[in-house]
Image: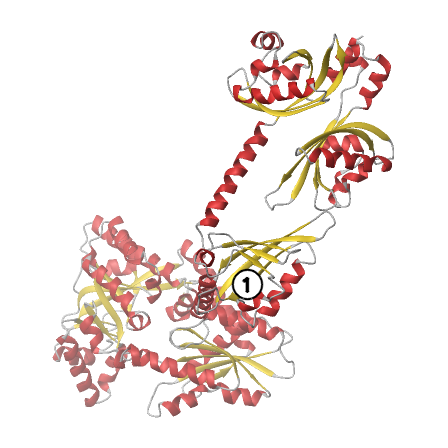
């Protein structure tokens, strides 16, 4: 019969108990649950204690023996009965050790081994050889039986695990140890420990416990925990069975802990932090010798009567003292950890500083707080830093949510705050979004400078902020403003919305007008983005008026917007189907009608063959940003046409291409223009980049940088619709402009009066003084052409020669035939 058939494999398990909390079990492994019948949930409830595992009458005996052992050494071995969860009783070997965790709490490490079957074997076989063999083969871990002969321990029997843990086979071990003499494998410096145990056994000791180093086969050192119990006398010599455990990792952890403790001590000796402890029973505060006031002799290292003499009151700020005392007294009544920040004045210091005090308590077996350990750290600089950071955060928040010129909210912050505010709106009040902007604001920037423009924006923002009806105000961008108003009645809100009246009070002689759109809000049914858009739609409608520059949103405006959205949505398909076409209008010399170039114009062909005029879709596409894609499509169409003429030996003429001001928002704009010209191998002198004068008003610096780069690359720069707004000759003097295209309105006024004709003549002479070429737009009859020629201005475009025509028509009529 096999030994494994006789004896079942022994179970063993490990648990950790909190010695300071009534031996509460804080961890257990699967072996523990298998032996005791308890579960993980029982441990997690934090109600299971080590004493619950004992037969009730056994625990006092166990506790008495345990205290006696621990009084001599920090580990113990005991055999006792264990009561399982279901009430049944089994026998276990209990190996226990005490240590402190990282928080200084006392923890018990306990290993339980189920030896109930061994008890049965002892009764059944009564010290037979089979008993010994079964015993050592079925105990957990590496188990051996040794005989004490004279001054040495000789191995009689051992499990295979015993040999394997040292890296040997049974035969290799016996050969290396001279027949099983344990001391032959011990680290030489630990042999005295072995000899001490042998001497103790000779005096009658019945147990063995030692932690020693053993030399493994690979010559590495291995720490082992050896625990033994007297078995019997055989041939006049005592026999012991030993359990050997590998504790190398545990020793390494202990060494790390020791080094860490030394590091902490070193830190404590060379840091501004103060470590102290308070003896509760004797009311004594103990300070380290390295504490500066102690070294200087200003205070003693041991301060008796700490609370009785109210010592803390002398150093803690009067305003913080009650709070400090409450925290301290709470620590002395219950075991806990606490942290508090108070102002303190150290001995010899003139001012109070902020300190953080962290305290932990230690209790005795009766649960009484006997010791308080603490650390005092200066946080004065930290608090000042936090205050600075807090102030910086407020500044950053203000900068990220407000407009730097007016101090009003930016669009994102305005939208978020308005949405939150209107969620709690009073249904009895009247609310509205009011959208405003200055008409022809570029006049201020161009003629009085950007500082004057910013001043006007700031003062308009102040008008909005000072209105009692204003809830939130925002500068959306440039000269566009949006605000949320609240009044009791609709009439009152309409009156407060007309900011232009107050603006005119500040600038009574100003011709600047403000267009305002109002969208009234139903607090029960609204969507913030939609209502803001509605106010903007009304503002755009107001800009088309001449007298009444205020418009209240009505539903028909949304129909217009829906149409605008439809046009924007159709653009990509129209480009793909080439329903968007390139037309060219010739530029010519008015004296002989000779072709000198052309302007590229866009036409959108409808399915029925008719065309949409640019006025129907250009502004819409500019609003949604699609104008950028359209401009580059037209630019490539121009390049393809020039390439076609070049490949077919036809003469090339310069073609001007319109580019929206929105291109300034894209950093690759210039590189893209240059790159496409290179792609089609077209000399840049045949391309004129045409921009409107208003483009310089939105972002003059970026516009000038872009135009100058294009000019340096050989492109000609045209400014379109000159004089239509409030253009300044200073713009021509300082900007990279080659050609000035005078707006058609001036040409139309030629036939009005002599005064108009003289004005045009003098204006163009001033433009010539800036060394720019002049092209007149909209020249439709011979009388206009003759006057301009007489003044010395000969370049024009207009119906006098031809309207804009498809590329194929332009090619047939003018390319290769420069004279009409």
Report which residue position mark 1 lands on.
341
Query: In the rendering, at what x and y percent does residue 133 appear?
Result: 75, 12
Quadrant in the picture for the N terminus: top right
Quadrant in the picture for the C terminus: bottom left
Q: Quadrant of residue 698?
A: bottom left
Camera-side residue of 40 and 795: 40
Q: Residue at x 66, y 54 (%)?
A: 336
Q: Residue at x 45, y 86 (%)?
A: 499
Q: Is residue 681 visible?
A: yes
- Numbered disc 1: secondary structure: strand
Q: Within 10 angstroms of label 1, few (less than 14), some, or many (20 or more) residues?
A: some
349 up-or-down from 649: above or below: below
Q: Is residue 634 left or right of residue 556?
A: left
Query: In the rendering, at what x and y percent does residue 67 appear?
Result: 73, 37
Q: Is residue 19 left or right of residue 602?
A: right
Q: Quadrant of residue 760?
A: bottom left
Q: Residue at x 69, y 17 (%)?
A: 202
The count of marks equals: 1
Query: In the rendering, at what x and y percent does residue 276 appear?
Result: 55, 54
- Specify how the rendered protein is coloured: secondary structure
46 up-or-down from 477: above or below: above
Q: Is residue 670 left or right of residue 117?
A: left
Q: Quadrant of residue 423?
A: bottom right
Q: Is residue 544 visible?
A: no
Query: In the rendering, at what x and y percent does residue 730 appear?
Result: 20, 76
Camera-side residue of 518 and 705: 705
Residue closest to the far front: 203
């Amino acid at each position: 019969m096999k030994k494994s058939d006789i004896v079942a494999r022994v179970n063993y398990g490990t648990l950790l108990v909190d010695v300071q909390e009534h031996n509460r079990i804080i961890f257990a492994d699967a072996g523990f649950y298998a032996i005791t019948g308890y579960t993980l949930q029982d441990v997690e409830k934090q109600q299971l204690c080590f004493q619950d595992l004992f037969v009730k009458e056994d625990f006092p005996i166990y506790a008495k023996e345990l205290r006696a052992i621990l009084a001599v050494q920090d580990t113990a071995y005991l055999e006792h009965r264990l009561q399982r969860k279901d009430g049944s009783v089994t026998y276990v070997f209990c190996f226990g050790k005490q240590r402190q965790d990282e928080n200084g709490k006392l923890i018990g490490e306990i290993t339980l081994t189920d030896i109930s079957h061994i008890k049965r074997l002892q009764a059944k076989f009564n010290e037979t050889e089979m008993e010994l063999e079964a015993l050592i083969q079925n105990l957990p871990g590496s188990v051996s039986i040794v005989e004490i002969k004279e001054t040495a321990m000789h191995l009689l029997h051992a499990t295979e695990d015993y040999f394997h843990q040292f890296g040997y086979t049974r035969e290799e071990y016996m050969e290396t140890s001279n027949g099983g003499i344990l001391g032959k494998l011990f680290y030489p410096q630990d042999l005295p420990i072995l000899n001490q145990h042998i001497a103790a056994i000779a005096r009658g000791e019945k147990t063995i416990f030692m932690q020693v180093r053993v030399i493994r086969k690979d010559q590495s050192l291995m720490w082992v925990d050896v625990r033994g119990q007297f078995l019997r006398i055989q041939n006049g010599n005592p026999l012991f069975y030993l359990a050997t455990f590998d504790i190398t990792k545990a020793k390494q952890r202990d060494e790390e802990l020791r080094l860490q403790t030394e590091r902490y001590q070193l830190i404590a000796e060379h840091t501004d932090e103060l470590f102290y402890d308070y003896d509760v029973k004797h009311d004594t505060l103990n300070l380290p010798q390295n504490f500066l006031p102690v070294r200087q002799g200003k205070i003693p290292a041991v301060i008796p009567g700490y609370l009785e003499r109210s010592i803390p009151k002398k150093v803690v700020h009067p305003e913080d003292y009650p709070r400090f005392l409450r925290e301290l007294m709470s620590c002395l009544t219950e075991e806990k950890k606490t942290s508090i920040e108070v102002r303190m004045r150290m001995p010899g210091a003139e001012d109070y500083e902020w300190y953080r005090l962290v305290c932990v308590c230690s209790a005795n077996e009766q649960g009484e707080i006997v010791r308080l350990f603490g650390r005092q750290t200066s946080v004065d600089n930290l608090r000042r830093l936090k205050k600075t950071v807090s102030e910086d955060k407020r500044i950053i928040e203000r900068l990220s949510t407000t407009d730097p010129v007016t101090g009003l909210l930016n669009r994102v912050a305005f939208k978020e705050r308005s949405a939150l505010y209107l969620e709690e709106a009073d249904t009895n009040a009247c609310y509205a979004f009011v959208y405003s902007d200055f008409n022809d604001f570029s006049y201020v920037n161009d003629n009085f400078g950007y500082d004057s423009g910013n001043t006007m924006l700031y003062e308009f923002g102040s008008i909005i902020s000072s209105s009692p009806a204003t809830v939130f105000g925002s500068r959306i961008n440039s000269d566009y403003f949006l605000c949320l108003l609240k009044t009791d009645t609709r009439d009152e809100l309409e009156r407060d919305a007309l900011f232009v009246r107050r603006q005119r009070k500040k600038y009574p002689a100003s011709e600047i007008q403000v267009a305002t759109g109002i969208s009234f809000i139903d607090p029960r049914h609204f969507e913030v983005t939609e209502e803001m858009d509605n106010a903007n739609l009304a503002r755009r409608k107001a800009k088309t008026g001449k007298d009444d520059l205020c418009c209240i949103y009505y539903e028909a405006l949304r129909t217009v917007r829906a149409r605008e959205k439809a046009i924007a949505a159709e653009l990509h398909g129209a480009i793909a189907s080439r329903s968007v076409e390139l037309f060219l209008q010739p530029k010519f010399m008015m004296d002989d009608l000779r072709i000198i170039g052309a302007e590229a114009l866009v036409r959108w062909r409808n399915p029925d063959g008719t065309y949409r005029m640019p006025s129907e879709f250009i502004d819409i596409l500019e609003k949604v940003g699609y104008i950028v894609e359209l401009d580059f499509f037209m630019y490539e169409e121009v390049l393809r046409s020039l390439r076609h003429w070049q490949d077919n030996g036809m003469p090339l003429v310069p073609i001007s291409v319109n580019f929206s001001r929105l291109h300034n928002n894209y950093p690759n704009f210039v590189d893209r223009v240059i790159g496409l010209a290179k792609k089609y191998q077209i000399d840049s002198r045949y391309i004129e980049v045409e921009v409107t004068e208003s483009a310089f008003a939105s972002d003059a610096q970026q516009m000038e940088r872009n135009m100058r780069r294009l000019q340096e690359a050989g492109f000609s720069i045209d400014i379109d619709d000159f004089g239509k707004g409030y253009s300044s000759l200073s713009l021509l003097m300082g900007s990279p402009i080659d050609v000035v295209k005078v707006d058609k309105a001036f040409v139309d006024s030629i036939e009005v009066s002599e005064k108009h004709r003289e004005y045009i003549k003098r204006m163009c002479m001033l433009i010539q003084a800036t060394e720019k070429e002049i092209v007149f737009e909209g020249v439709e009859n011979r009388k206009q052409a003759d006057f301009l020629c007489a003044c010395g201005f000969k370049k024009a475009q207009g119906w006098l020669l031809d309207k804009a025509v498809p590329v194929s028509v332009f090619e047939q009529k003018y390319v290769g035939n420069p004279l009409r």
